């Protein structure tokens, strides 16, 4: 009797363990939900997902959602996208939103957009409800030198066909800023821009700035224009200051050259004076040699001294007269 009870209890434990192991490998609740929703998912497919380490709930629940929305997708497509690293639930939500808005979007295209790192659901929502991008303040200068600070609002809609490989929002903002700078810079006066701000938006919009981007530009509106500094006057002032410094530098260079020339002439004068003193020192020796050789007589020597004395006297008288003569009044 005891042996029979022991064998029955052991059999019961084995059965419970087998049931627990079966429920662990087979998501029975998901299978029942799929059958109730009319989605054809085999029990062995669910077991295979568990063996491939794929969360069955992330495949079955979006599949049920897609089936109820009338989308033609199967479990293998969703599982393949999950294994590729995609977000299955977001792709199905995007497909449902595109289907309701009558936007042509295939499952393969949605998967490609999702795997490219873009939010495909936000892209579909942006296609239905366009987004307004506000540019930072763009500083531009008109031909008369007045600075204008322009701020614009760009209304864009996502282009589903160019989401993969298309440029982002930063490119659109940069192109719009470039167009604003070009149009303001081509204006003859800043008043022309202030009188017709819509001219900027029309001209920029006609340039096709959305080419190669993931967006379609619907409109460009000038939100605010402020008058800034007089850049032309500032540049002229800076140029005049630079010219002044250049002239001062050249004048200083010429003054330094003049000082150097003066010093050079002073040195040359001193050199000549030294030569004169040297020549004067040789005069007595030459006179003595002439007297000794008989080429100069004694009377000639005295006459020469008289001439020198007379010359010194005349020079002294002339200097005294120049000092005593009063200055003439300036008329």
Image: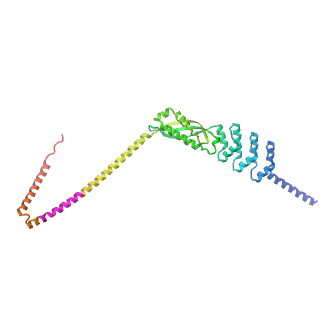
Image color mode: rainbow
Q: Which residues are magenta?
A: 268-286
In the image, what residue occupies the spot 49% across and 40% down?
A: 140
Q: Residue furthest left?
A: 299
Judge by depth and name the residue closer to the eye, 19 or 101. Answer: 101
Main secondary structure of the magenta stretch = helix
Provide residue 236's location: percent of width, then percent of height.
40, 41
In the image, what residue occupies the spot 24% across and 58% down?
A: 268
Q: Is residue 247 above or below residue 143?
A: below
Provide residue 106's location: percent of width, then percent of height.
70, 42
Q: Residue furthest top?
A: 195
Can you tell which quarter of the image residue 118 is in?
Answer: top right
Judge by depth and name the residue closer to the eye, 12 or 174. Answer: 174
Q: Is residue 327 left or right of residue 142?
A: left
Provide residue 283's location: percent of width, then percent of height.
13, 63
Q: Is residue 87 above or below residue 292?
A: above
Can you tell which quarter of the image residue 221 is in?
Answer: top right
């Amino acid at each position: 009797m005891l042996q029979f009870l022991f064998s029955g209890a052991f059999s019961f434990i084995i059965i419970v363990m087998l049931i627990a192991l079966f429920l662990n490998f087979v998501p029975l609740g998901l299978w029942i939900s799929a059958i109730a929703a009319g989605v054809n998912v085999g029990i062995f497919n669910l077991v295979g997902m568990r063996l491939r380490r794929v969360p069955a709930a992330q495949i079955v629940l979006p599949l049920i959602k897609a089936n109820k929305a009338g989308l033609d997708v199967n479990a293998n497509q969703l599982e393949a996208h999950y294994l590729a690293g995609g977000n299955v639930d977001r792709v199905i939500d995007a497909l449902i939103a595109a289907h309701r808005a009558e936007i042509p979007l295939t499952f393969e295209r949605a998967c490609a957009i999702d795997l490219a790192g873009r939010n495909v659901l936000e892209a579909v929502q942006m296609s239905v409800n366009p987004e307004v991008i506000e540019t930072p303040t763009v500083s531009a200068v008109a031909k008369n030198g007045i600075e204008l600070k322009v701020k614009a609002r760009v209304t864009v809609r996502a282009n589903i066909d160019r989401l993969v490989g298309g440029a982002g929002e930063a490119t659109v903002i940069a192109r719009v800023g470039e167009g604003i700078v070009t149009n303001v810079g081509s204006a003859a006066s800043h008043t022309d821009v202030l009188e017709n701000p819509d001219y900027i938006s029309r001209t920029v919009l006609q340039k096709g700035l959305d080419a190669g981007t993931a967006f379609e530009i619907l409109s460009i509106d000038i939100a605010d224009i402020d008058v800034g500094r007089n850049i032309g006057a500032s540049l002229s002032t800076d140029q005049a200051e630079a010219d002044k410094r250049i002239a001062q530098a050249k004048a200083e260079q010429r003054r330094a050259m003049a000082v150097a020339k003066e010093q050079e002439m002073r040195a040359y004068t001193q050199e000549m004076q030294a030569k004169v003193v040297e020549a004067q020192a040789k005069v007595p020796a030459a006179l003595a040699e002439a007297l000794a050789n008989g080429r100069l007589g004694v009377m000639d020597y005295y006459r020469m001294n008289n001439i020198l004395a007379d010359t010194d006297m005349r020079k002294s008288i002339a200097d005294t007269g120049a000092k005593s003569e009063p200055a003439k009044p300036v008329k």
